[in-house]
Amino acid sequence: MKPHTALIMAVSLDGKISTRDGAGPRFASKADGIRLREIRSHADAILVGAGTIIADDPTFTERGKYKELRLQRGLAPNPIKAVVSGSGSVPETARMFQSNGAPALVFTTERIPPNRLAPLQQVAEVRCVGETTVNFRHVVDILGEAYQVKRLLIEGGGQVNFDLFRAGLIDEVYLTLCPKIIGGRDVPTSVEGDGFDFPDIVDVELLDRRAVGNELFLHYRIWRG
Ligand SMILES: NC(=O)c1ccc[n+]([C@@H]2O[C@H](COP(=O)([O-])OP(=O)(O)OC[C@H]3O[C@@H](n4cnc5c(N)ncnc54)[C@H](OP(=O)(O)O)[C@@H]3O)[C@@H](O)[C@H]2O)c1
């Protein structure tokens, strides 16, 4: 069965997800970090793009209260960690590949050169799911069928988010609107890619909104008409 798929992002008031110097989502507050941990504690697996791993180098390892919450919910102590990397640019030294008991997966394409495939196979389960671009429908199907993922959390970045929206695979969006202006035409936004033409833009329905300090915690579901 297809996993339920939620996307989570922190964005500045002008829609940016990083800063000009590539500092990632550090502009978000501690409260946003707590919200991320809470939402992660429901997820069987987390999926990100290679750009996010290269920029932010997350571990996806849970500790303390959030590990406890996962166990109470009948989940594994840590979520499955999956990265999309068509060319294999994700480094095998990334912290997500350090062992924490949860499987680490790389979804790649036939484009991956042997000198990238071999080191990644040493640290992760590598799955080829496309000729030149990763087929996200296959990714989601594999996670659901081979790894029994029921709740999948997408943590960016902008390119992966676009591909998943385009494939119609996102069910919910958690957005934190941060009271910051970042600017910069080359600084990534929450959804990149080629963009949509007017009739194809994605409609969302607001499920919940909460102001915490100067931030807005927003929760939407995708409106499929
Ligand atoms: N504010 C937030 O909440 C937040 C959250 C996450 C990330 N970020 C920021 O987002 C930025 C990264 O975003 P991004 O858009 O540059 O990168 P991204 O979406 O994280 O990753 C892009 C990479 O993923 C692979 N990829 C994506 N779609 C693919 C497809 N269909 N087929 C094959 N490969 C595919 C490619 O890897 P290969 O090059 O290996 O082929 C591509 O270069 C960073 O600055 C990070 O800090 C912010």
Image: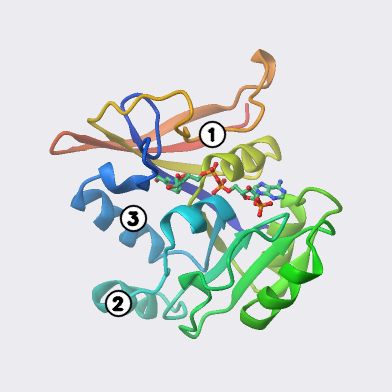
Q: Which residue is mark 1?
A: 191
Quarter occupied by the N terminus: bottom right
Ligand 1 closer than 8 Å to the CB at disc 2? no
Q: Kindly report the distance in space between the C-alpha atoms of the residues bearing marks 2 and 1.
A: 30 Å
Q: Earlier in the sequence, mark 3 or mark 2?
A: 3
Residue 168 position in % (x across, y down): 67, 39
Disc marking residue 131? none
Left or right for 14, reference 115: left
Q: Kindly report the distance in space between the C-alpha atoms of the residues bearing marks 3 and 2.
A: 13 Å
Disc marking residue 63? 2
Left or right for 57, reference 51: left
Residue 140 picture quarter = bottom right
Q: Alpha-carbon neighbours of circle 2 within 10 Å: few (<14), some, or many (≥20)?
A: few
User: What SS does tag 2 mark?
Assistant: loop
Q: Amino acid at mark 1?
A: Val
User: What SS does tag 3 mark?
Assistant: helix
Q: Nearer the viewer, mark 3 or mark 1?
A: 1
Q: Which residue is mark 3?
A: 36
Q: Amino acid at mark 3?
A: Leu
